[in-house]
Amino acid sequence: MIQYKKSYELKNKAKDALEGKYGGAMLIIFLCDAISWMVRMSVSIVGSSTAASVYMKTQSQSAAVAVTVFFKAVLLLSGVILYVMNAGIALYFLKLACGQPLTLRDLFCGYRSESKKTLVLAGAMVLCRAVCMGPFEHFAQEFLSGIRGSAGYALIALAIGLCVYLPLSLGIALSFYLMFDFPQKSGKEILLICWRLMKGKKLRLLYLEFSFLPLLLLSILSFGIGLLWLQPYMQMTYTFFFLDLMNPRRASSLICCDPKALGETCRRKSLSRLRRCVSFVYHKRAKTRGGYASPLVAWKSVSS
């Protein structure tokens, strides 16, 4: 039976890995959050002002609603495009965990290569949240606007949304990490592999996320300043959670060695070279910091 590391062990490894490298980790997450916030705020402000302008000129409620719906769709699409940066976050922290050279350009790796695959993964995650939590956000907004009776609907939508959203989001939470370990797979295949990897592990990840709640509350009390330190710590812990799951025995059961299913890799290696890479990645122990046999390190060492 495979023994997985406890939450406190993963957190200790995260602290050790971040020692002396907190600055770069904080910077790359701050850049991701800042860019996302600026784009979302810009779209929201333009959408609100445009809807108000249309209503003042036409005095048509339906026209204003149509403009609002259009900009909400634009906001959703921009959310998918912006979420691609999370692939860069995953790559950066994988490199950090495995002792690889780091660069801020990693944040935009999802736009430079395999962009179609990355968009599929980002779209799945964003749409999952939008579909499951969208009704709650709608009724919550109505409640804040003073519409009576919306509070009850908001609570019902929240309960139903969480029951659906949590299993789905936890099941595909590690997709960006897997994307770098299975470069020959399509976005749909990555999602299926991630779902299979997380089978029976969703509660472990949920427990790990809940264990950060006290620190999150303290960060909120510090007016969000504490998040600058907390977010890299959380991301590093999730990275070691992924590496802990991807032990050679577990990983070898996830990959399909059928030549037709493997197809051509993103680096255009031959099938024979690919088989050697897969064998090296999943059946040899790569010596890395922390004692992990990282598929990422092994793949890069073979393909370089």
Image: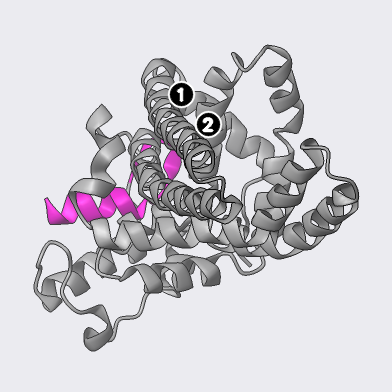
Magenta part, dominant SS: helix
Near-viewer residue (151 or 267)? 151
Give the residue at x 28% y 84%: 261
Pointer 2 residue: 14
Name the image quarter holding residue 91.
Answer: top left
Q: Is residue 265 above or below residue 63?
A: below
Q: CA distance from mark 2 to mark 1?
A: 6 Å
Q: Secondary structure at mark 2?
A: helix
Query: The residue under label 1 is which amino acid type?
Result: Leu
Magenta residues span: 287-304
Residue 126 image position (x, y, % from top left) = 50, 55
| Quarter in which the N terminus is drawn | bottom right
**Residue 269 located left or right of residue 251:** left
Q: Is residue 11 above or below residue 134?
A: above
Residue 275: image x %, image y %? 21, 74
What residue type is disc 2 on?
A: Ala
Residue drawn 67% across and 36% down? 8
* Residue 254, above or below 206: below
Q: State if disc 1 and disc 2 touch (CB < 8 Å).
A: yes
Given residues 99 and 132, the one toward you in this image is 132
Q: Is residue 284 visible?
A: no
Residue occupied by mark 1: 18
Instruction: Please tell me which residue lies in front, 234 or 276.
Output: 234
Residue 245 screen position, x and y as percent: 53, 57
**What residue is shown at x 44% (from left), y 18% (from top)?**
22
Percent x, y for residue 215? 71, 24
Q: Secondary structure at mark 1?
A: helix
Q: Residues within 10 Å of mark 2 (few under 14, many from 20)?
A: many
Instruction: Name the image quarter holding residue 224.
Output: top right
What is the basis of the colouring in this image?
Answer: one colour
